[in-house]
Image (cartoon, helix red, strand yellow):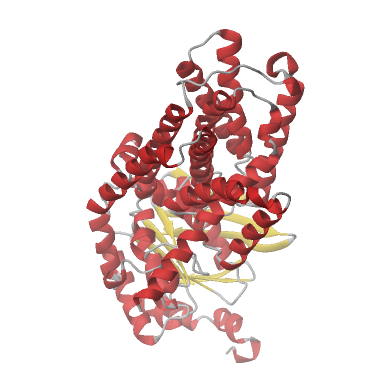
Amino acid sequence: MIRATGLNKSFGGVRAVHAVSIDVPENSIFALIGPNGAGKSTLLNLLSGIYQPESGTLEFAGHNLIGLPAHRRVRLGLARTFQKIRLFKQLTLLENVLAGFHIHQDAPFWEHVFRGNTGRFRNEARELLAFVGLEDRAEERAGALPYGKQRMLEIARALATRPRLFMLDEPAAGLNGAEVEFLLKRLEEIQQRGVTLIVVEHNMDLVMNVAQRVFVMDHGEPLFEGSPREVQANPSVIEAYLGGEFAP
Amino acid sequence: MTGRHAAIAVAILAIAAAPWILATPYWRGILVLCAMNVLLALSLNLVMGYTGQLNLGQSAFFAIGAYVSTILIKSHGWNFWLAGLVAVLAAGVLGLALAAFAARLRGHYLAIASLGFAVITYQVLLNWEDVTQGVRGIYGILPPVPGTTGLFYLVAGIAAAVYLLLDNLVRSPVGDTLRAIREDEVSAASLGINRAAWKAFAFGLGAAIAGLAGIFYPGFVGTLVPDAFGIVESFTMMAMVIVGGMGTMIGPVIGAIVLTFLPEVLRGFGELRLLIYGLALTLVVLFMPGGIVQAWTALRARMRR
C-alpha cells in the first residue's frame, strides 16, 4: 500500500530518521513503536508530507509521493491525526468534521455565494460524530471537549476525507481504560471498512491487540519488524526499551 | 430563516431612513463615508477575521480602486461602471498576486509584506506624476449619481449586497475551509486544504471589495490625492474590524459605523478629540477583546440569568 526505501531526514545534524524502509500491506494495521525520540513521529510526518525526506523513495498505491505537498497526498487517500492534538478549537465539533470534507466539495463557486450553506455533508458528518460517540455534542466548541474526546474528534475529522491509508500518532495517549477500549474497537472497525492503518503508539496492550505487523525504531533507525509475538520475544527490542541489563 | 428576513427588512429601513434623520448635507456626507467604511471593514474582516491573516495593507487596494477608475474616466473617457469594473478587477488581481507571492509567509511576515505593498503603492501614487498627478491631485471628479443622498443609497445598497453574499459565503463550505486555515494551518493541510491557494483567494476577494469601496471615493470628495490612502487608513480599517468583533459578519459593520461617527460626535472637544478617540480604542481592545459583538453577547447571557 505504502512503500518507503532508505528514507533519511535530519534536523541540524541530528539524524531523526535514518535509512528507514517500510512496506505496509494493504488493509493491515501496522504499528510503529520505539522509545521516545526514536523518530516515529518524524517518519509519520515524512509519510504524510509535513516534511520532505533528504533522500529515499516513497510510493503510495503506485503514486510517487516525493515532493508532493501534504494537501495533495490527502487527495490520493492519505489521512492522519496528530500526537499533539490539532483541532480547530474555536469551531464546533460539527464544523471540525465538515472542514474534513473539503476535498469532496464539488459545488461550483457561485452556489456558495448565492445559496450559502447547502448542507451536503451534514448527515455524513453527524454519522462520523456518532461513530466516535460524540453525536450529542455536535454544536459544542471543540476546545471545550475533554482531552480523550478531542482525540476521538480528530479521528472523525480525518475520516471525513475518506482515507485509504489512515495514520494515527499516539491515538491512545491520555486516554483512560474505557476510552482505550472504545478506540480499539473503532480502529478495528475502520480496518474492516477496507482502510489501511499505521498507528504510532506507546500503549503496548493496544499495539499487541490490534496490530498485524509491528515496526520497531530506535535512534531514528529500524530495529526490528515482525508480528506482535515476535516483537515481544526479540532481545534487541527489550534492550532498547528497558536497557541492557534486562536483556536475556 | 425568518430571523434573517427580519434583519434584512430592518437594514433596508435603516438605510432608507438614515438620510432623512441626519438631514443636513454635512451629515449625509458622513453617511456616504460610513457606507464606504462598512465595505472596507467587510473586506478586511474576510482576510483577518475569517482566514486569520494579518493584513496591514488594505488601504493600498482602496487606493487602487480609486485611482484606476478615476484615471480611466478622466484620461481615457471611460464610462464610470466599466472603469469601476476594471478597477475592482485590478485591485483583486493585485491582492491575489501579493498573497500568492507571499504564500510561504505566515503571520507577521505576510503582515509585513502587505505593509510594504501599501508603502510602495503610496509612493507610486505620489511620484508617478504623469499618471496620478502626484501631490497636485486630480480635480473635478463627478460622482456616478447626482446628490449626496443618491450616492449614499448607491454605496449603502452595494455594501448591503456585499454583506449578504459574504454572509452566504462564510456559511458555505468555503467558510469552513477559511476558518480551518485560521484555526490551524497544518491541520487544514492534513485535510487536503491548499492553504496557499485559499489564502490568496481570501486576500484577492478582500482586495477586490476594498477596490469596490475605492471607486466611489473620488466622486464623493471631488478630488483625489495620495494622502487619502496613507498607512494610517489601513489601521483605521483594522480598528473597525476589531472594535466591532473580528470573525463575525455584523461586528465589522457595527465597528465601521461607530468609528465613522465617533470622531464627528467628538468634534466639540476640539484638540482633545484624537486623545479621546485613541483612549476609547485602547479600552475596547483591553477590556473587550472580542469587540462590541462579544460584549453584547456576554451582556445578554448575564441578563438572562
**In the rendering, at what x and y percent does residue A174 appear?**
47, 80
User: Where is the C terminus of chain A found, in terms of image quarters?
Assistant: bottom right
**Is residue B87 placed above or below B185 in the rendered structure?**
above
Q: Is residue B19 visible?
A: yes
Who is closer to the viewer here, B14 or A241?
B14
**In the rendering, at what x and y percent does residue A206 appear?**
40, 79
Q: Which residue is at 35% across, 49% downward?
A: B171
Q: Which residue is at 34% across, 52% downward?
A: A101
Q: Which residue is at 46% across, 20% downward?
A: B146
- Find residue A160 and report its image quarter: bottom left
Q: Is residue A60 visible?
A: no
**Is residue A26 placed above or below B145 in the rendered structure?**
below
Total count of labels: 0
Residue A238 placement, left or right of B150: right
Who is closer to the viewer here, A245 or B294?
B294
**In the rendering, at what x and y percent does residue B266 appear?**
62, 51
Who is closer to the viewer here, A72 or A90?
A90
**In the rendering, at what x and y percent does residue A241 appear?**
58, 82
Who is closer to the viewer here, A172 or A14?
A172
Residue A3 placement, left or right of A122: right
Q: Residue furthest top?
A: B77
User: Where is the N terminus of chain A found, in terms of image quarters?
Assistant: bottom left
